[in-house]
Image (cartoon, grey):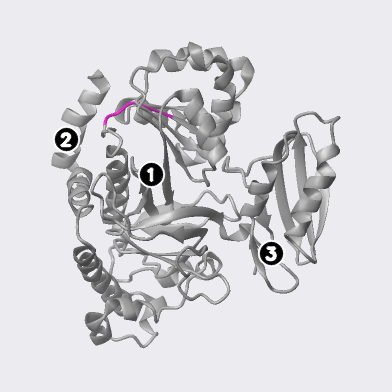
Amino acid sequence: MNPQKFFIEHALYPAMERLKGNRIRAYFQELCASAQLSPKELQQLQRQRLQTLLNVCIASVPAYKGLGITQEEIDADPFAALQKIPLLSKREFQKDPDRYLNLDFDPAARIANRTGGSTGEPLKFYMDRYSVEHYEAARWRGLSWWGITFGSRSVMIWGNPIELSTKDQRSAKFKDQVLKNRTVLSAYDLTSEKLDEYIAFLNRYQPEYLYGYATALYTFASLLLPRREKLHLRHLKAVVSTSETLHDYQRKAIEAALSCPVVNEYGARDAGILAYQCPCGQMHITAENVILEVLNPETFAPAAPGESGLVVTTDLNNLAMPRLRYLLGDTATLGQESRCCRGITLPVIAHLDGREDAIFKLPSGKLVHGNFINQLSRKCQNLAQFQLVQTDLTHAQLKLVLKDPIQRQEVDAFTQDVSSFLPGVTVEPQVVDAIAVSASGKFRYAIRSFAL
C-alpha cells in the first residue's frame, strides 16, 4: 500500500474522528448499508428526514413560516406537504438569502460556501457540518463501487483555482498532497508541448483515479491518444467525470486513452452528490440525502417516464439554510426501476441532459433541448468545436471551430440542420479560431441567454 494512503486511512481519519468528531466514515458505512434497502424502507427513511426538515422550516425559517403548512400536515404526509412549497429558483433565492436561514441554528456553526458562478453571479449560501459530511460520505460510497478508498491517490484535472484552494496557495498544496493524497493539473495548461512532461509525471505518480470536468478530461485524453503506449499506469481504476454533461464521444476517447472505465458523478456545490454511476452503468440517486424531482419545464408537473425535465432538489440534511424544491438549473430524465448487478436498490437517473438554460425557446412557445446540436454535429467531420447561443426569441449565434479552416463546405449544411430544429429563429453562423470556456473552466455548447 502507498505510504500516504496508509497514513490517511489508518492515522489521519482515526485522529480526525477522535479529536474533531469527524463522522464521514460512519456516514459512509450507513450509506453503504442503505444502498441495499427496499423501496419501502428507503421511502420510510426519506419520510423521517423530511418530517424533521419541514418542521424546522415552518418553525424557524422566515421564507417558509408563512406558507400555512401545519405540523399536523407534515406528520401525516410530509411528501404531500412538500408539494405545497413553491419552487425556488436561484434568482429568487439571491433576492434575499437571509430569509432562508434557520434562525434557531447557531450562527457560529454555519459553514459558508459559494458556487463557481459559471452561469452568472456566484451563489453564496450556508451549510452545516452534518450535511457537508454526508456529501463527502456519498462521494466515497460512489467511489467505493469502483474499488477506490479514502486514501487512494488521485490526480485532479481542474479548471478554476478558486474552487480548489484558499488564498494561501502553499497551504492548499500541502493539504492536497499530504492530507488528501492528490495533486492538481491545471486544465488551463493542457498543451501538446507539455505532453511528455504529463506522461512522465503520471508514470511516476501512479494515481488510482483521475478526477475532473468532462471537457478537461476529454481534452487531456485527446492529447494522450497518439502517445498512449508511453503511459504505464499500473493502479488506475477509474476516471471520474463531474460538473458537466459527459457525452458518449468523450467517454470513448477517455477510455481509449487511459484504458480504464469512465465514471459519471452528478453533483453540485449547492446540492451535494446527487447521483453516482455504478459498474452496471446505472446512475444511482443519493436518495438518503435528497429528494430529487424531475418536472416538465412548461407545466412544472412531474415529468412523464422517459421525458426530460427540470431537476428540483430538496436537501434532507441541511438545517442551517434549508432550500426546499430548489431549481438546480439542470435537466435530466428519470429511469425505471431496474435490477442492478451490484444489488444497489437506489432509484436511477436514465440520462443527464444538461443545463436548464440549454433549453431553447421558439416564437411559438415550444421548448427545444439543446442536445439536438450535439447529435447533428456527428455528421460533420471537419467540426472541431461548436457553441449555439440563443440571444433572444428570434436570434441565435452559432460559433464553429473547424479542423481545417479552409474547408468550409459543411458550415452551411450544419447551419441549415440546426435551423430546422429552431423554426422562427434566425441562426447566424460564425467561424472562429477558438471558443472560450467559462470562468470556472467549464465548456457549454448550448446556451439560452434570456429567461424562459
Instruction: Report, in whole angstroms, how far the alpha carbon at label 1 lies from the one at label 2.
Output: 36 Å
- Label 1 sits on residue: 281
- The amino acid on which the numbered mark 1 sits, given as a three-letter code, is Gly
Q: Secondary structure at mark 2?
A: helix
Of callouts 1 and 3, the N-terminal one:
1
| Magenta residue span | 151-155
**337 to 182, vertically: above or below:** below
In the drawing, what numbered circle is on residue 450?
Answer: 3
Residue 19 in magenta?
no
Count neighbours of disc 3 (C-alpha within 10 A) and say few if under 14, some if 14 to 19, many if 20 or more: few
Q: Residue at x 30, y 30 (%)?
A: 179
Q: Secondary structure at mark 1?
A: loop
Toward the viewer: 284 or 164? 284
Of tags 2 and 3, which is closer to the observer?
Answer: 3
Q: Overall secondary structure of the magenta stretch?
A: loop
Of callouts 2 and 3, the N-terminal one:
2
